[in-house]
Image (tube, rainbow, N blue to C red):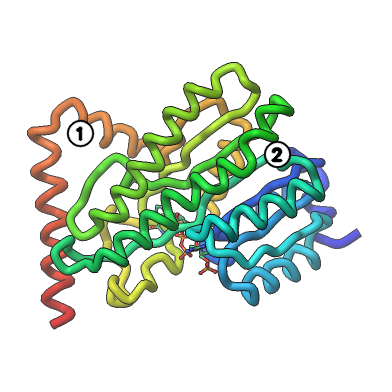
Amino acid sequence: MKLANRKSSNKKKFQGKIVLITGSSSGIGRQAAIDFAENGAQTIILASRSKSKLEELERRIGSDFSSEVLVYPIDVSKEADVIRMGREILDRFKYIDILVNNAGFGIYNKVQDQQIEEIKSIIFTNYLGMVYCVKVFLDSMIERRSGHIINVASVAASFGVAGLASYCASKYAMMGFSESLYHELYGSGVGVTVVSPIGVKTKFFNNESFHHRTPNYTGFMLEPKKVSKAILAAANSHRLEIMVPFYVRAGVWFKHTLPYVINPIVGYLFRKQLNKSKNEKK
Ligand SMILES: NC(=O)c1ccc[n+]([C@@H]2O[C@H](COP(=O)([O-])OP(=O)(O)OC[C@H]3O[C@@H](n4cnc5c(N)ncnc54)[C@H](OP(=O)(O)O)[C@@H]3O)[C@@H](O)[C@H]2O)c1
């Protein structure tokens, strides 16, 4: 028995489960794939654009764990890619147990300086990519009265901040869609949970609009492992949203309860950061 298998033999929470993770070539999605494998998932389906990175992860999981791994190099913003992947998976397995909609990216600059194509690209990837995946697998989940959809949003689903208008819009949209779906699916056996982290140390900030700099928005950044842990918890949760860390919820509560106090503070801090980054780029 391989060492990692022995280590994880007590952790078989996801034994027999088929898990699909979008955006699994990097960061949070990659870590979640490893953690589902460590927790005994039967099959892990990896989906994102970079075939070589997905294959590298396939080898890593194959060498350390016993999960079967399937690689789908797809662009979630393209409906045809998602439909093709969904058909192949449903033909083969008839269903999946857990869908993690995690693929996403952000572009950091003012609305005034953003191209419409950039804005569309964010919405098509972060929001519609999730909708395409949900639509492909939802019927089979409802028929089986089983399944869980996990949508990785962000604290940006609760705060609109300067420099990230399109990104925040995509995450607010994800949150609204998930909340409605959560209520529609009440009693169906199918769950929906949104995982909303603050800043995480990933390649997210490698997008050139961040100028290869990680903004210190929140005082500190999380490790992907912390968010992955929340994703695994979400798979067995009845909650609509899990914020990471949990106490960020207090900030959201303050925002809704005392908007006239909180909004100017948040506005000032993010505006300052955006202006600083603009000056650095000059
Ligand atoms: N890092 C943070 O501070 C933070 C905070 C809150 C929420 N989030 C959210 O967490 C999620 C994961 O991001 P991350 O932090 O792990 O960043 P990351 O390391 O850059 O990973 C992003 C993943 O999304 C995939 N992806 C991007 N566009 C795609 C597309 N069109 N089709 C398919 N896959 C695509 C990328 O793979 P390919 O390039 O191979 O396609 C990659 O696997 C995102 O939804 C992000 O919004 C991140």
Mark 1 lies on residue: 255
Residue, far right: 1
Tag 2–tag 1 contact (CB < 8 Å): no
Please, what is the three-letter code of the amino acid marked with disc 1?
Answer: Lys
Q: In the picture, residue 150 is in which quadrant?
A: top right
Q: Nearer the viewer, mark 2 or mark 1?
A: 2
Residue under the image location 39 percent in, 38 percent down: 175
Please, what is the three-letter code of the amino acid marked with disc 2?
Answer: Asp
Q: Is residue 89 above or below residue 260?
A: below
Mark 1 burial class by Cα count in 10 Å: few <14, some 14-19, many 20+: some
Image coordinates of residue 197 in percent, x first then y, are 41, 47
Element class at badge 1: helix
Element class at badge 2: loop
Residue under the image location 79 percent in, 65 percent down: 62
Q: Quadrant of the C terminus?
A: bottom left
Q: How many marks?
A: 2
Mark 2 burial class by Cα count in 10 Å: few <14, some 14-19, many 20+: many
Q: Which mark is residue 97?
A: 2
Image coordinates of residue 192 in percent, x first then y, are 54, 32
